[in-house]
Image: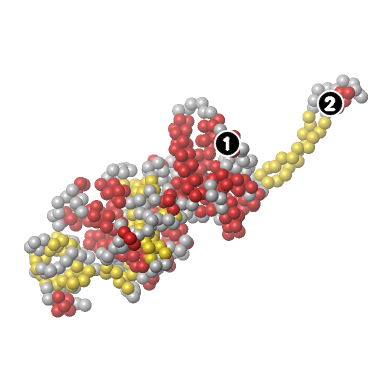
Amino acid sequence: MTYEDYLKKTGEYGEVTDIKLPLVTVVGIPTCSLSEIVYFQSGIVGQVFAIHRSHIEIILFNKKSPAMAERVVRTGEKLSVPVGIELLGHSINPIGENLLGGASIKTKTYRPLDGPLPGITARASIKKPLHTGVTLVDMLLPLGKGQKQLIIGDRKTGKTSLLLTMLKAQVLDGAVVIYTGIGKKQSDIKHILSYLEKENIAHKTVLVASTSSDSPGMIYLTPFTAMSIAEGFRDLGMDVVVVFDDLSTHAKFYREMSLIGKRFPGRESYPGDIFFTHSRLLERAGNFKIEKGEVSITALPVVETIESDLTSYIATNIMSMTDGHIFFDQGTFAKGRRPAINVPLSVTRVGRQAQSPLKRDINQKLTAFISLFEQMENLSHFGAELSGKVQNTLKTGEKLNVLFNQGKHTIIPEGVQLVVFALIWGNMIEDIDATVLEEKITKLSDPKAVALIKDITSGVNLDELLLKANQKKPELEQFLGVFKTVVTETVTTTPAPPTEPGSPDDKNKPTQTTQTTEFSQTDSVLFVPIEDKKTRDM
């Protein structure tokens, strides 16, 4: 519809009295409502941003400026975006246009950016685990479907790499993924697109993006468009994972618009309603009841910190409205650990309730051990003489760090994570280089090992897992590529010299014995016998 069509429909118009891009002040249109779409005579589209007694403020979606005294007509409509399976494999901007140009994307359904939300009775508790493919996250900071988990840290610490790995794992698990780039550089958007195509997961993803060259109004709408699209898939009975990369950039552009609109600034010059703006976005995620069961929208907002400062206004705001956070630390990154997650300063509040009894048992014991290991590691830096128990704790902790160090965009299946952990925790694996271990884990991911992995991880607690892993060592060695060779050695033992030939001491003459020893074809033996449980617990 055109300006004239909407003028005939509503019969209300106003005139532009002030222009401070991206905001335009308009006098008139007395019955307009917040977030309503308006049309300018020149064809520019805007949205009602604020309503005052004498005028209204319109936010523009492009950088083209209207003329002074130009007429503006209300439409009586709210902004809607296309939703549905037709969007899969496409990249769009916040108002639903094809990001790469070409023909527009046609869908059967449109959904308003601020539609009605499900009530408390339509929500369900989080019961299903969300597998990320990242061992450190899955074992220490587990997530559940429908959770709101903040990813926070300094720039260039690996946040995007973790998110892309998690998205790939979720696509393989059958979920729909929506990646939201908020005010990103065009090179960053191209990198995301190339990754999705390279990993052959673009057909199950939707990219919603705005660039830093777009209007602040367009950037402001970006996360709300992504969430509306996610709700469209939710209504189709599909689990959705949404990444908001990142909300700190979104807050900066919202602050810019608010200051131009002369709103009273608060802490760090952000407007007073910045908390409401982000909370009403993230509260649209969750686990919901439908006729055929339950369906979820998992939200993964990102916040960029400066010098690892977790006390900034936006960081603390979003921490308080999410179900936990994963903190990427510069110090951890400098140590060479990947992903560079600071586990003691990270938390997950609802993910553990979605775990199986086995993983919950492992999580409890592993969390306590990591705390003990860090204390022992700090103690060892003083050069103090360490007891055998402390040395064993340090060795086990170092092996676990090798397990948690994971290559970029590498996905480790859940069962493989548990089996390799059991080998380390049960002291069945010797010191091994990270590269070698990664190669062996890849071999364990062979489809032929699925039945073996399933059998080992069928227990309900850690003790059963350790017992089955010890029993299945020969089969595991085949998949891990370590085959033992039997080598026969002849050892000559010489006791005390005999007295006289034929004497009773004649039995003490030199003898030869044969000793059989097992050696690995590799430089170091992978498996060692499991210790007695009582000895291990001492």
Tag nearer the camera, 2 or 1:
1
Residue for point 30% across, 51% down = 321
Image location of residue 306, percent across then percent down: 30, 45
Distance from the alpha carbon under mark 2 to that under mark 1: 40 Å
Q: Is residue 537 left or right of residue 164?
A: right
Residue at the limit of the structure toward the top, as seen here: 499
- Can residue 185 be seen at all in this image of the molecule? no
The one nearer the camera, 340 or 299, is 299
**Residue position marked by numbered label 1 in the rendering:** 536
Check if mark 2's residue and mark 1's residue have beta carbons within 8 Å: no
Residue 359 in the image, given as x and y percentages of width and height: 49, 49
Label 1: few (<14), some or many (≥20) within 10 Å?
A: few
Residue 93 drawn above or below residue 250: below
Along the viewing direction, whichever of 168 and 64 lies nearer the viewer: 168
Q: Amino acid at mark 1?
A: Arg
140 vs 36: above or below: above
Could you tell me which residue is drawn at 13 percent across and 55 percent down?
Answer: 262
Left or right of residue 320, residue 73 in this image: left
Tell me, for residue 508, which label it has, or none.
Answer: 2
Q: Amino acid at mark 2?
A: Asn
Badge number at residue 389: none
| Residue at the (47%, 61%) spot, across then down | 173
Which one is nearer the viewer's eye here, 357 or 23? 357
Mark 1 residue element: helix
Residue at x-position 37% and y-position 63%: 289
Q: Position of residue 496 (x, y in %)?
A: 81, 22
Left or right: residue 389 versus residue 49 is: right
Which label's residue is closer to the chain start, 2 or 1?
A: 2
For the rendered model, the colour scheme is secondary structure
